[in-house]
Image: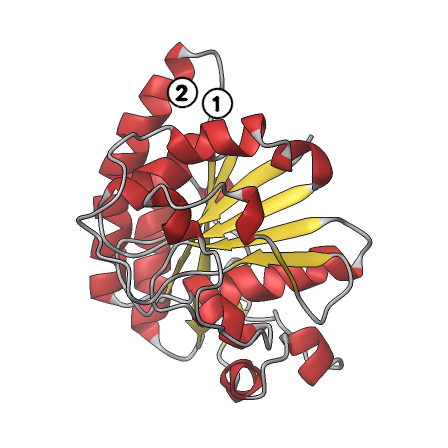
Amino acid sequence: MAQVLVVTNRKGGSGKTSTSVNLAAEFAANGRRVLLIDLDTQGHCAIGLGVKAQKDTPTVHGFFDGRHPLSSAIRETPWEGLHLIPADPLFDHGSGSKEELLLRQALASEGILGTHDIIIIDTPPSLDILLLNALYAADRVLVPFIPHFLAGEGVRQLARVLFRVGSRRANEGTRLLVGYVPVMVNTRIGQHKTVTGGISTQFGASRILPGVRTDIRVAESFAVGRPVRYYAPKQRSKGSGINS
């Protein structure tokens, strides 16, 4: 039975898609059956995996519009063990189903949970039915954030949504586990330490994961449609020291 990991932040440009794509690639490279679902209509997950968009291809947003089953949108990627449900860049965020549990129900009823080990969901920054569907389907939530002041505010705004969803999940007898990871970290910048320290104080030091340092090769890897582990296999992804 698959574990569902949602990668989210209320602020755009916080590294959600880079985190989603590269985590999915790492899990798949280690022998896990991985499905990456792109709920963000920018559609950047497909770009990061080198999957070409095709006209009339089923998408996760087509599923929310009621045009086809979720499972029909699953596509192969160039990377063994890694599948993608792509986004529809033309989807209107005000359209589609208003049911908050639609994605969760489809993952179970269409057998998708049974055919994968890990499902990673990249979310839009907006607070809408797509984000709520992702969170109600989640077992775990990962919140990447750039340690700037506005990013810290985005994390705090998201926390209110997580509390609402977590309370409902608790009433169902399930627990929503949340972790926070600072990205594009530079330990020489005092604000990075200050913002990360504030989030650590507010949400608990045990929830703060090791930071990911700034590296141009992450952006370069998207330009060529290859996850970092394949574009720069000797790349050092951590080592910020901000959590030591």
Q: Is residue 26 left or right of residue 183?
A: right
> Residue 175 got which mark?
1
Labelled disc at residue 148:
none
Q: Position of residue 7 (x, y in %)?
A: 45, 51
Q: Is residue 10 visible?
A: yes
Crowdedness of circle 1 by 10 Å Cα count: few (<14), some, many (20+)?
A: some
Horizontal arrangement in the rendering, residue 25 relative to residue 48 (left or right): right
Q: Residue at x 47, y 27 (%)?
A: 105
Name of the residue lying farthest toward the left: 94
Name the residue at 24% across, 34% down.
98
Q: Examine the image and state in which quarter residue 13 appears.
A: bottom left
| Residue type of the residue flagged with mark 2 | Arg
Rendered location of residue 148, percent (x, y)? 28, 68
- Residue at (45%, 56%) from the top-left corner? 59
Tag 2 and tag 1, C-beta contact below 8 Å? yes
Task: Give the position of the N terminus as an image quadrant.
Answer: top right
* Horizontal and vertical percent position of residue 47: 51, 76
Residue 166 in which image quadrant: top left
Q: CA distance from mark 2 to mark 1?
A: 6 Å
Looking at the image, is 6 positioned above or below residue 187? Answer: above
Q: Which residue is mark 2?
A: 169
Amino acid under disc 1? Arg
| Secondary structure beneath label 2 | helix
Residue closer to the observer: 227 or 170: 227
> Residue 171 location in percent, x, y?
38, 11
Q: Name the element at disc 1.
A: loop
